[in-house]
Amino acid sequence: QVQLQESGPGLVKPSETLSLTCTVSGGSINYYYWSWIRQTPGKGLEWIGYIHYTGDTNYNPSLKSRVTISVDTSKNQFSLKLSSVTAVDTALYFCARTGSTGWTHFDFWGQGTLVTVSS
Amino acid sequence: QSALTQPRSVSGSPGQSVSISCTGTSSDVGGYNFVSWYQQHPGKAPKLMIYDVNKRPSGVPDRFSGSKAGNTASLTISGLQAEDEAEYYCCSYARTYTLVFGGGTKVTVL
């Protein structure tokens, strides 16, 4: 059974860069797309972007200028960087694996990690 | 404001059927057969219930079904059970090569 675990700082200062890592266990990071999704009480769920194990990426246009997703296949990990954060970036951040038939749905999720943006 | 519109809440008694609508546009729900549905219990991660409009992942009970007509997708839960009480979210591929979610629907089992 594939398992995903998010890790990273729970508190980030405004204007700084949010950095999270997702570690995949119970399966290889190869041959799938891997996404970051965040959840806030106000905006609900928001897809941030995906990375393919080959390094191909696709980002939500609303966040594209601030987002970088990378992959380290040797560590079975992928990472998220979100720059110039503000309070509106405070959210529960999930990493997820997209389904085997395409990148448009998510069949395995991490438990989520809360990131608060505050000075 | 979410891109896809869902009712805030629906309710039903055990054994009844409930349906949740997810309304978008021809640029997302209506234009592609890439609608998925997720169930989320409090404090838990979302769980995939339906993908590609009407396909059920292994392990999801067959009382969960999905459909689409025009710009509106629907999730139907037949034979409602207590454990079905949760928040449900729809998600669709959109023309701008992105994914958009609905605002969520709280299902209450009376």
Image (cartoon, coloured by chain):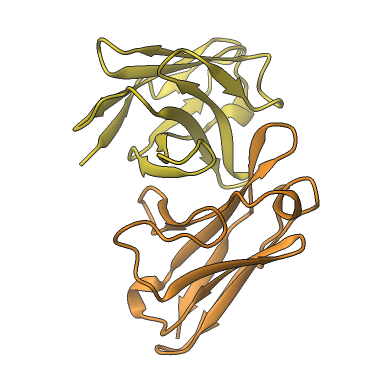
Chain colours: A yellow, B orange
Q: Nearer the viewer, residue B52 or A37?
A: B52
In this view, A107 is above or below A86: below
Name the residue at 57% across, 58% down: B53
The quadrant of the image that shows the N terminus of chain A is top left
Q: Is residue B96 left or right of residue A86?
A: right
Where residue A8 sits in the image (x, y, percent)? 35, 20
Residue B75 occupies which quadrant of the picture? bottom right
Where residue B62 sits in the image (x, y, percent)? 38, 73
Where residue A105 sits in the image (x, y, percent)? 49, 44
Q: Nearer the viewer, residue B62 or A81?
A: B62
Q: Is residue A73 left or right of residue B42?
A: left
In this view, A27 is above or below A54: below
Q: Nearer the viewer, residue A38 or A25?
A: A25
Name the residue at 80% across, 51% down: B26
Q: Is residue A44 left or right of residue B32?
A: left
Residue A93 occupies which quadrant of the picture? top left
Residue B60 occupies which quadrant of the picture? bottom left
